[in-house]
Structure formats: C-alpha cells, structure tokens
Image (tube, helix red, strand yellow):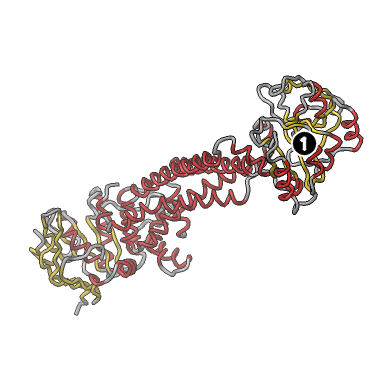
Amino acid sequence: MPETVVAIRNLSKIYAQGEIQVTALNDVSLDIEMGEFLTLMGPSGSGKSTLLHIIAGIDRPTSGRCLVQNLDVTGLNESELADWRNQNVGFVFQTFNLIPVLTAFENVELPLLLTQLDRSERRRRVQTALDIVGLADRMHHLPKQLSGGQEQRVAIARALVTDPRLVVADEPTGNLDSHSAQEVLMVLQQLSREAGKTVIMVTHDPKAAAYGSRSIHLEKGELLKDEAVTAR
Amino acid sequence: MTLGTFIIKNALRNKRRATLSILSVAVSLFLLVMLQVALRELTNPINDEGSSLRIIVRNKVSLAQPLPRRQLQVIERIQGVAAVSPFTFYGGLYKGDEKFTSFAQFAVDPERCPLLISDAKIPKEQYEAWVADRTSCILGRLTAERFGLKVGDRMQFTGQIYPADLEFMVAGIYHGTADDRNLMFHQSYLDESLGNPGTVGTWWVRAASIDEAPMVTERINNAFANSSAEVRAESERAFVLGFVSMWANIKTLITGISVVVVFALLLVTVSTMSMAIRERFRELAILKALGFRRRELFAFILAESCGLAMAGALIGAGGAWVVFHSIDIQKATNGLFILFEVTPQMMGLAFAVATALGVLSSVGPMLAVARTSVVQGLRTLD
C-alpha cells in the first residue's frame, strides 16, 4: 500500500484585508502519496498557491492540520520550521529566484551551507544535482549567463540537493517558452517516477498538468475535482 | 563557498554603491580623527617635568596689562623660587612671514634663563654669545630650519604690539623643548627700544621642586595681594589652557562638529543599508524558504553592514594615521600645529563609531526582515 506523505485535514486559511476577510482555503482535506506528481490547478485566487505554501511550511493555516510524514508542520515554531524545510522540502518558483551574484554551482550549494556536510561532500552532491538536470557543464556560469530554462533547471537542482522528500513547484513553467517548459516538466516527472520524490506543482496550464500523475482542481478555496492523470 | 564568501559577494554586488558607502564612511572618519587630533593639540598642553616646575605670573587684571619691574626683587626672595626672569611676549612680524607671526618671540633675561629652559639643548659657546650680545637672540630649531637661518644671520621684526621694530643676530639655535619654534632675546634690548618703561609682560618662575610648585604659586599671589599691581600666578599648564579658553569654547565647537559628522554619517549608512536590503527582500525570502533562520539572516545583514563600515574605518582612520605620520604638519599648517599625533584612543574611537554605525544601520533592515513572512517576501517585486 502506498505511503501517505502529506495528510491535510480540514485546512482553512482566511486572510484579513482591512475589515474584509477573504477565504483562501475552506475546509480542505487531502492525502498525497509518496512518489506522486500532483498538480494543483484552478483559476487565480482559487487557493492553490496558498495550499502549496502551507504544505511547504512557508505559510500557516487559520485552522486545520497539515501532516507531512506524520509530523504536524502547523505546530512547529519559526526556527523548527526553517530546519524542517531545509531537510524536507525543495522549492521551485516561477521566477527561478536564483541569487544573481552566485554561480550555478554556488546557488545549488546554498541550502547545504546549513548542513554539517564537509566541503567535498557538498561538492559531490551539487555535481550530482546538476548532472540530474543536465547542467554539469554550466556550473560556473552566473544566472545572467544562462537561459530561462537553464535557470529553472538550476533552481530544480537547488531543490534536489538536500535530497528532500517533497519538491514543491509554484508555476515553474510560467516564465518559460514551450521547449524549456517541456524540459523542466520532464525533469520533474523524472524525479517523481525514478527518484520517488513527491512533487507538488501549481499550474494554470493543462498541458503542464498532463505531466503529473494526479490533478486536483480548486475553486474558491474548495476542492472541486481530484483525478488521476493518464501517463504521458 | 562559505557563508563568509556569500556575505562578501552580497556586500559587493553593487560595486559602485559599496565603494561610495565605504568612501563616505572613510571621509567622515578621517575628518573625525582630524578633529580629535586638532582638539587634543589645542587643549592638551605639554605636561613634562620642566613644564610642571614653571610658573607664569601675569597681571591679575589682564594679560595685556604689564607688571612693574620692581616685582623681581620680591619674587626672587619668595621661598621655593629657584629662578625668575621677565617673560614678555613681543609679537613682532618677521619679514619672512607674510600675514601673521607664525612663531613667538619672548624677551627674557638670558642670565636668569638656564634653569628656566633646562630642557633646551644649546651649545655652551652659543649660549654665552647670546648672553654677551644684547641684540642677539636664540632661535628654536624648527623656525631656523623653516626659514633656513643659521648662527650669525640677522632677523628683522616689525612691532605689532609694541611700537618698536627690532633686529636680532642669531647667536644660537636650540632644540629639545616641547616647542622648538620660539625666539628668545634680551628684555633689556626691548626696554631700551621702548624708552625703559620699567615694566615686563609676565614673570617666568621656576619652583625648586614639583611638590613646592603649588605653594610657590600661592606665595607669589599673596605677596602682591592688595598692591597696585596684583598678580595671578599659575602653572604653565594652567596658563596655556587659559590661552586656549580665549579661543571661545573650542572643545564644544569641535565636539559639536564631530557629533554632526557622525550623525550625518549614520543617516547615510542607514539609508544605504536600507536600500541594499530592500532590493534583496525577495532573495531573503528565498533564503528563509530554503531553511535559513531569522538569526542567520540577521547575521548576514549585520556582517554586511559592519563590514562596509569597518572597511571605511580602515581607509579613513588608517588613512589619517598614515597621512599625519607622513606630512610635516608644521609646514602644512604654517606653524599653527607642531605635532599632529593620531593616538590609539582616537583610532579606537573611529573603529567604535564604525562598529556602532554598522550595528545601528542594520537594525531597520533586520526589523523589516523579521516582520516579513516568506510569502510576503516572495510577493515583493524585484
């Protein structure tokens, strides 16, 4: 029986905008299994990014629980949450968010600076991560010397380098041309299928969602549809 | 890569801004050190043994009022007085000087002087030549070097205080005193030029011992109390400090300027650091997402801020140390200052100010980072 990695129970998130309260998530419950490539879809304001942020431990729900590998991340304090993110979550963002003054190698190495690994072990891990995304030959390039697709692949390598269970991606192909988007999606799919990582991706694009193994549609903060995706 | 390299790369990412920030700190701290040095030179008179023994006796009404010559016999007999000589500031304009007198000329009694200027080193034959020739003078080495004067040369002065133009023959050149700029000549020569008025500017007294000096001061004051020419005797140090006080409250003025410099510098540094952090808000949010804790981000900001301030301090305070040790300050200030010494305390002050700047300018950015969640930071536009 597949192991449940993420268990979400009655999750709600309400933002206060002045005197108006906006419900981003309304009593969402969901299980995500190990190795799944889950895509979160829905129109703007549907709560998909909020859900992703709560699962990744960078936002807190108003109520409900979010258990990742049986650990309730909503109960962790700021410092514990930071450690937990470093060890368990890899982030990929729409705008790549690489540090412009660091080379590809250094950008990937960044999360490892928080670990006890020695220099040679860090180097080995960074090289492996860059090999996986096919950018070992670009390791000494600065972000501005890379194409958008290559930057995003460096960001994926940075997400992988700590060997996390979860890889969360917030519209990772939103800023890419179709060819680069395809490359990135294939890398994410490979991570799920071959490395057994649980990948959760927010996207607007049904073509991108087709790379996943399961797709969830949200609207007005509620789960609308939860369906398996035919293998691509 | 180490965290140190990461901090350095971040600090230098906008090289022009980093350079300008460092230079603004450097220039301000150079100015601060210069002001402190000037303040020290102006308010910290020489305090060697010779100076501690010397007492200046002036008219109680005002320094500008002369004292009767007849007081000499009274002072000589006061217990604890080892030597006494007239000490009259002539204040003539040397023909080599353009607008103002850059060195002092004092009329003294050469025969009574050896004990009073025991720290002055002068060849015996030169001293004897000075005593023997009423129109001769002895000159401090610094002034002699400055004007290229040697023994036997003549110096002409136009009286600025006294209506007497004097010409001296340089009989000797001395060195070894705290201020090797002064010229000394015969009081009798000045008296003769003024028609023997029977007065002197001040008395220069040497106490027999340092322990006795305060009592000698008191005895001299008492000796002339309720006379037609009451005196004010004080140590040479107190006398010099009295002179400094005539320049208005220079200490308050320089301290005020220093505070303004530091405050302006603080505003510049705070503004620079705020800008540097504001434009990296998104990146700091990414670092938080990657697992960096608040305290680590604080450390980055503090290290960057203090690093820039310290680099400025190294250039500014270090530069002041190098400059003031290399240049001839007497020549550069036309004789206003003899020495311009940067003390370890001043360097300490400059680096303490830099540290405080680094810490204070990082407080705002730290608070902003602490208050901003990862999600808010990610929404920040680049």
Please name the residue shown 70% across and 47% down the image: B218
Q: Chain of mark 1?
A: B
Identified at 64% across, 34% down, the residue is B61
The answer to whether residue B2 is seen in the rendering is: yes
Left or right for B89, reference B344? right
Q: Above or below — where is A27 with respect to B7?
A: below
Front-most of residues B244 and B369: B244
Above or below, A16 against A82 in this view is above
Mark 1 surroundings: few (<14), some (14-19) or many (≥20) residues within 10 A? some
Decide which of B27, B100 is in the foreground and name it.
Answer: B100
- Looking at the rendered structure, the secondary structure element under dot 1 is helix
- Quadrant of residue B154 within the rendered picture: top right
Q: Which of the two residues, A3 or A195, is positioned nearer the viewer here?
A: A3
Which quadrant of the structure image shows residue B231? top right
Question: Measuring 66% from the left and 30% from the top, which residue is drawn there?
Answer: B64
Q: Is residue A120 above or below residue B243?
A: below
Q: Amino acid at mark 1?
A: Gln
Count every numbered label the image shows and give the total. 1
Q: Is residue B180 left or right of residue A26?
A: right
The image position of residue B127, as x and y in percent, is 88, 35
Residue A88 in view (yes/no): no
Q: Position of residue B66 (x, y in %)?
A: 71, 30
- Pointer 1 residue: B71
**Horizontal relation, residue B226 to residue A3: left or right:** right
The picture places residue B277, in percent across and down from the top left corner, at 36, 50
Q: Quadrant of residue B105?
A: top right
Residue B87: percent from the left, percent from the top?
Answer: 76, 34
Most extreme residue toward the front, as rendered?
B226
Quadrant (top left/top right/bottom left/bottom right) for the C terminus of chain A: bottom left
